[in-house]
Image: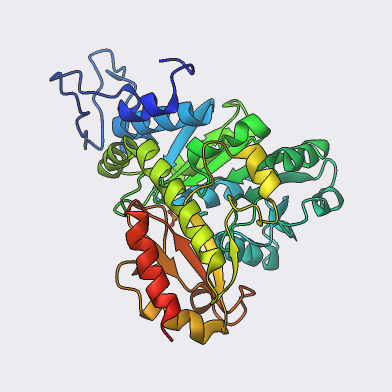
Amino acid sequence: MTNQIKPETVLAQGGGAHDAATGGVAPAIQLSSTYMRGPDNALLTENFYARYGTPNGRQAETAIAQLEGAADARLFSSGMAAGLAVFRALPAGAHVVATRRGYFSIVAWLTEQHARRALDVSFFDPRTPEALTDLVRKGETQLVWIETPVNPVYEVVDIAATAEAARGAGALLGVDSTAATPLLTRPIEHGADLVFHSATKYLNGHSDVLAGVLCTRDETLPLWKAIEQERTVGGATLGAFEAWLLLRGMRTMHLRVRQQCENALRIAHELERHPRVERVTYPGLPTHPQHATAVKQMRGGFGGMMSFEVKGGAAAALGVISRLKLVKVATSLGGVETLIEHRRSIEGPQSDVPEGLLRLSVGCEHADDLWADLNAALSAS
Ligand SMILES: *Cc1c(COP(=O)(O)O)cnc(C)c1O
């Protein structure tokens, strides 16, 4: 297959994977932990030992690399395992610049590494990427790490501008593109070197697999080699069954994401008009502070993630979610079912997330049903 094939075709055909041994249209699951050698002591196939990778993992990696326009991809046992593999592959004490907001556990982990002096981390506000130019240190900063659209408010970070600042300092740029999916944004086209997804979210899409993936623009990058080594030696390789489930889930990602984008835009407009809603942050709304950047770097839609602030703070927001009947109150995102969460209660007292903020992951249900549920929960007092 070539890169000319459209993402929809790559996905529907599971990246071309099938079972050559039986003619099965669906790929088989190969659970073997180890692989045989022939009389000459050479491996019979490219497979060696499952910690180094599995045939099912490689099938999903091939499809994801193709979607991202990447030279290569590697699956990990979770998003966090993938994300931390990048930072652990850096030399001790390396200077890293990251967005102050972002996936909670990644920002918390980086903050801790900085405190322990394992890494030298500078944070910048994703709303003011100009600040990056002053934070990067030429010849010293090794990595700039951003997330866009960024948790939990869903501001948008300009990848091309960030890539330019990173390159100017001789640093690599890594992008957590989980919320954008490989369908709506291809960060490598905007200058990123590494692309990260929590595959637990949109790639799998059914809230039943934990997985992470990293993609690289260039498989000869020394950092990429170190990341691969980190996975192989550290053992955070994705299991074959999870990889099989992931590729199965991916086969409908284009249909899911299209519906999620359509539903989310409708819900965002409705929420914005609701008298009990203070603010809606959805990249597809013209009122979004970085809407122009979103239009520039996202194509075909603005994703299924948004946040909105309920008037009346934490008590009012918790009241709203207590009255929902259809929308499930749970952490995580990107599944076919709509989920909502009060981030402030999850993050704890040190959190700077507004008290009344609710994070909404819009699913594939009928938008009328979703809005009826949200409207009833908001309107009751
Ligand atoms: C979920 C998530 C992660 C972490 O991934 P896990 O699969 O939960 O380990 C990282 N970044 C973003 C944006 C996420 O949504």
Could you say which is closer to the camera, residue 2 or residue 53?
Answer: 2
Say which quadrant the N terminus sits in.
top left
State the scheme by which the image is colored. Answer: rainbow
Residue at 61%, 75% (x, y): give it: 354
Rendering coords of residue 258 (x, y %): 42, 41
Q: Give the quadrant of residue 29.
A: top left
Rendering coords of residue 3 (x, y %): 48, 18
Rendering coords of residue 156 (x, y %): 65, 51
Residue at 32%, 54% (x, y): give it: 366
Could you say which is closer to the camera, residue 326 or residue 274?
Answer: 274
The single residue placed furthest to the left in the displayed view is 22
Judge whether residue 214 can be spotted in this image: no
Could you say which is closer to the camera, residue 48 or residue 167?
Answer: 167
Could you say which is closer to the camera, residue 28 or residue 335?
Answer: 335
Q: Is residue 328 above or below residue 154?
A: below
Q: Is residue 209 above or below residue 232?
A: below
Count the marks. 0
Judge whether residue 177 can be spotted in this image: yes
- 299 to the left or right of 246: right
Q: Is residue 338 above or below residue 53?
A: below
- 158 to the left or right of 205: right
Residue at 42%, 67% (x, y): give it: 340
- 99 to the left or right of 141: left
Q: Give the quadrant of residue 48.
A: top left
Q: Give the quadrant of residue 311.
A: bottom right
Say which quadrant the C terminus sits in.
bottom left
